[in-house]
Amino acid sequence: MKSILTLLIVVFLFSINTSAQVFFNPIAGKQSHPELEITKINITETGTIIFLKVTNKLNQGGWFCADENIYIKNSKGVEIYNLLKSENIPTCPDQFEFSYSGQVLEFVLYFPPISKEIKFLDLIESCSNACFSFNGIILDNEHNKKIRAFEKGFDLYKKKQNQEAIPYFEEVVSNKITLDSHIYGLSYYYLIIVNYELGNQEKVDFWYQNLINSELEDKNTFIKELENSGIKK
């Protein structure tokens, strides 16, 4: 009996985990407060839980609070979900007073469940002073990973570390396209540019052909740019 009960508990817990979506450190297209970060978003059948942390960057003083009027919204739609409750954060006008520079305050916001089809989410604090907001939070772990890969590749390219940049651009265009984004066309473009600058014409031709054969809606923009630059004709 004990072994059967244990098995049922394991199956139950596994079913909960597989029905949840978890997004770690999701990227937002735009945000108001650079010191405020979303560390995790859990989306389950019963609710949407957003974990945040704010870091005090002032040498002296500093405070933080969250208004009771906070909501999340489908960035690509009209659905709005109001805050149900919060944890470890004072409700304005009450404030958390920071004791020192670099101190971190972690808190949690709870909302109703949202559709798992939503891929871009807004988090909005509706208030009258120093309100925080995140627009276009990406609910796709693979796409967030590709964005970070592109940013790393582009940073290396700017530093003229062309050979080191290549694997990061290749990571972006590998496998399937996750969400509509300019990072795919830009990665093809920089793979061609980098290999051209390295004198690797075979790779230039390879990636140019891959760009032409891709299903990217904006590929003609990059093809035209490469033609205008004289790299391809």
Image (cartoon, helix red, strand yellow):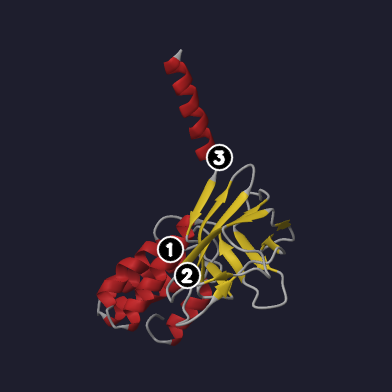
Q: Secondary structure at mark 2?
A: helix
Q: Is residue 80 left or right of residue 49?
A: right
Amino acid type for the residue under numbered disc 1: Lys
Which quadrant does the C terminus fall into? bottom left
Q: Label 1 to label 3, Cα distance in Å?
A: 24 Å
- Front tag of 3 and 2: 3
Q: Label 3 to label 2, Cα distance in Å?
A: 30 Å
Categorize mark 2 by other alpha carbons within 10 Å: few (<14), some (14-19), many (20+): some
Tag 1 and tag 2, C-beta contact below 8 Å: yes
Q: Earlier in the sequence, mark 1 or mark 3?
A: 3
Tag 3 and tag 2, C-beta contact below 8 Å: no
**Residue assigned mark 1:** 146
Instruction: Residue 76 in the image: state x and y as whole percent.
Output: 67, 63
Amino acid type for the residue under numbered disc 2: Ile
Q: Tell me: residue 122, above or below residue 191.
A: above
**Residue assigned mark 2:** 183
For the residue pair 60 and 77, the one nearer the viewer reads as 60
